[in-house]
Amino acid sequence: MSTDAVAVTGVAWATGLGCGQEPVWRSLTEGGTGVRPVPSTRTLRSDLATVVPDLPADSAPADRQIALTARTMVSCLQDAGLDPGDRRIRAVLGTSYGAHLDEPDTAELSSWATRATAWAGLQHRPTVVTTACSSGSDAILLARSLIRAGAAEICLCGGADILTTGKRLGHSALGTISPDGLRAFDISHNGTVLGEGAGFLVLETSGSARRRNARIHGYLTGAGSANEAAGGVAPDPTGHSLSLAVHRALRGDGTTPRDVSVINAHGSGTPLNDMVEATTYSALFGESEVRPVIFATKGAFGHTLGATGALEAIATLQALRHRQVPPITGLDRVLPQLRLPIAVGAPTPIGAGLGLSVTLGFGGFTTCLAFAGADR
């Protein structure tokens, strides 16, 4: 790996299954899920959701967003062996709406990030990304761009989002919420389940990581995004935007679809999104000599909106490390349009190669991150 490659030297997540890297991964591989009934005083299409277990439920939404963000960032920096006061660190943070739908008049949409980075002890104001469900992925993409351009030496990047009444009401009205559970890529899929969480990565050049003798979790070899602008809440059914984002991510390191061993799909459980992913991945990879394995984590984590891309990036790194993927929660009968191996019922081994993490956001935001394992 060249000295200008972008290394991942720190990771941390907070999920409906907990916060520890290995315990959460172990729970995923055992088929665990954080989805459960979460009561609401409002009438919803379903009360199923995920919440971070030790985040106080009775705190104000803005306070929960800031606490979740700050403590996960601190854990990520600790994992990377970095002091939050190190002035080389630049933060790039993403969210969908955070607490803003429920507390719209309290502050600007970016203020949660400014307060969280100050609470965590970082020395610079953050850059904030808001691109719907792709926010966490786009924060990582932007951080990689800053490092490669020489505008930052070390970036702390990712996303955070909390479960709020406003989001649950909005998605209930849109009809995107499943009344009985998230079943990504299953022929009976009928919607998603909302959740909350946070995920952050530390990125730096591999040369910088080696100079400070940092542990390397893997490498971010490429990142690509696209937007077909087909509509406010639905993707382009042709999959052109998704295909373009994948090709752009692979172009970053001179790799091709043949080099991909695993794909962490968006897997929202909504029929249109699942179908776009199923047909596009089958077209891109279905004729490869060794086809990548598909997995997805929203059945366990819930759809965490602006955090989902960062959580799934970490899950992709874990899959590359352990050479296996967890089973997809709720998947029993696979869509016939998906002509790739997929994790059903039990952990599934994967071969050597790249891992892709893909997000599809409202407004047409599509992002693909390409990772290589630490042993590449």
Image: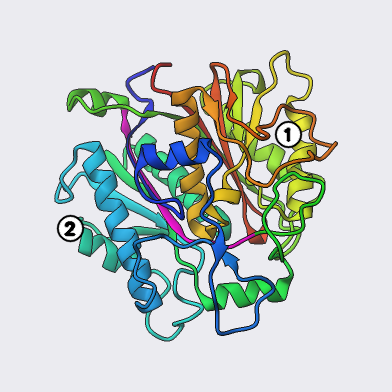
The label number, if any, that marks residue 16 in the structure image = none
Q: Visible in this render: residue 288? A: yes
Q: Nearer the viewer, residue 44 or 131?
A: 44
Look at the image and tell me whether residue 129 can be seen: no
**Residue to which mark 1 is pinned:** 281
Please tell me how crowded label 1 is: few (under 14), some (14-19), or many (20+) other residues with Cα within 10 Å.
many
Q: Which residue occupies 72% across, 66% down?
A: 179
Q: Position of residue 88 (x, y in %)?
A: 20, 44
Q: Could you say whether the residue bearing mark 1 is in a helix, strand or loop?
A: helix
Q: Secondary structure at mark 2?
A: loop
- Residue at point 57%, 17% (across, down): 351
- Would residue 131 be found to the left or right of residue 20 on screen? right
Instruction: Residue 373: give x, y in percent of width and height.
Output: 44, 23
User: Residue at point 32% right, 47% down?
Assistant: 156
Q: CA distance from mark 1 to mark 2?
A: 42 Å
Q: Sequence-wise, which precedes: disc 1 or disc 2?
A: 2
Name the spot of residue 375 as percent of width and height, x first.
Answer: 40, 17
Total number of numbered discs in the rendering: 2
Q: Residue furthest right?
A: 336
Q: Position of residue 165 (x, y in %)?
A: 53, 77
Residue 343 image-quadrant placement: top right
Determine whether 111 is above or below 88 in the image. Answer: below
Q: Which residue is mark 2?
A: 121
Q: Quadrant of residue 210?
A: top left
Magenta residues, start to end: 193-205
